[in-house]
Image: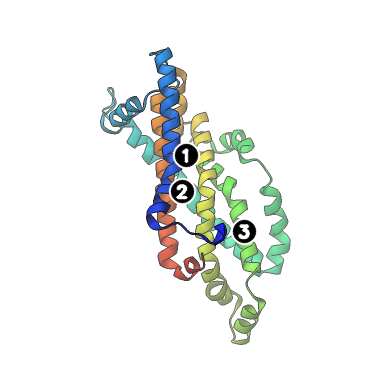
Amino acid sequence: MRLINRKPGRTLGAALAALPFVLVLIGYSIGSEIRLSANPADKLLPALSTIGETAQRLFTQGDRRTGEILLWKDTVASLTRLLGGVGIAAGLSLVIGMAIGLLPYARRSLSGFVAVLSMVPPLALLPILFIVFGLGEVSKIVLIVIGITPFMTRDLAQRVLDIPREQIVKAQTLGASSLVIALRVALPQILPRLIANIRLSLGSAWLFLIAAEAVASDVGLGYRIFLVRRYLAMDVILTYVIWITLLAFVIDWLLRQLSRRAFPWMEAGL
């Protein structure tokens, strides 16, 4: 049997999925042991046990001045910004993408603008956003929106354009208006793609959020990472990085489960 036709079983598949993570942990442990044996005060690669102790402290112990657990406070602030930005971007991309895909006038007017906007580096706009919207929450959310909306819009517009023309013609023959065609023909077919786009854009959204928090914020996961870097507190930084990765994984998993339950016919072909 050819290698491309071989599929691992459930047990072997789980082992193969875990293998890269195990190798990374082993490599880190070896590197940490080497550095700490040469210099026990080294902060660059703290031992895994040190990271575990730091994580337990960050998740359970409150700040000495305020009594608040800063990690949870940072998490709530960052997730609020992230979900707000991604939600607004998803809504805008859905509406604009459907308009471009269905309406020739909108396609002629907006497709070029969206294409050009997608070429602008979002982080280059960060100083402008701070000047226009100030250093508060709005500028951080707007950065996420600007950063991921053009990509999502272009993909959704193309997905609408890929809908077989016969479906549009049949709907018009049955007397459907443009709004009905958008809601009953196009929308059900691009909603699964919208969820897929959100999943693909989460990494970029986190990047823009952390960059904005690092520049101007007094709370948030990105703010905390850049605050403690001056003290070379790698155990804290790595704890936050692992926590951000775990949050991103959970959000992605939830979106995948939503797609599977809401659109099982899409998952059947994967």
| Secondary structure of the residue carrying numbered label 2 | helix
Q: Of the residues shown, which amino acid type is indicated by label 2?
A: Gly
Q: Reading the chain from its start, which is encountered first: label 1 or label 2?
A: 2
**Front of the two marks 1 and 2:** 2
Which residue is painted at 42% across and 50% down in the image? Answer: 251
Label 2 Cα crowd, 10 Å radius (few <14 / some 14-19 / many 20+):
some
Q: Is residue 236 left or right of residue 177?
A: left
Please tell me whether residue 106 is drawn above or below residue 142 in the rendered image.
Answer: below
Q: State the image coordinates of residue 249 (x, y, percent, origin top left).
A: 42, 47
Contact between marks 1 and 2 (CB within 8 A): the answer is yes
Nearer to me, 168 or 3: 3
Per the image, the residue denoted by label 1 is 137
Callout 3–callout 2 Cβ contact below 8 Å? no
Viewer-closest of 10 and 24: 10
Answer with left or right where residue 142 lies relative to residue 19.
Answer: right
Q: Which residue is mark 3?
A: 155
Q: Position of residue 172 (x, y in %)?
A: 62, 83
Q: Position of residue 166 (x, y in %)?
A: 65, 80
Q: Of the residues shown, which amino acid type is indicated by label 3?
A: Asp
Q: Quadrant of the N terminus?
A: bottom right
Mark 2, residue position: 84
How many residues crowd around disc 1 within 10 Å: few (fewer than 14), some, or many (20 or more)?
some
* Mark toward the start of the polypeptide (3 vs 2): 2
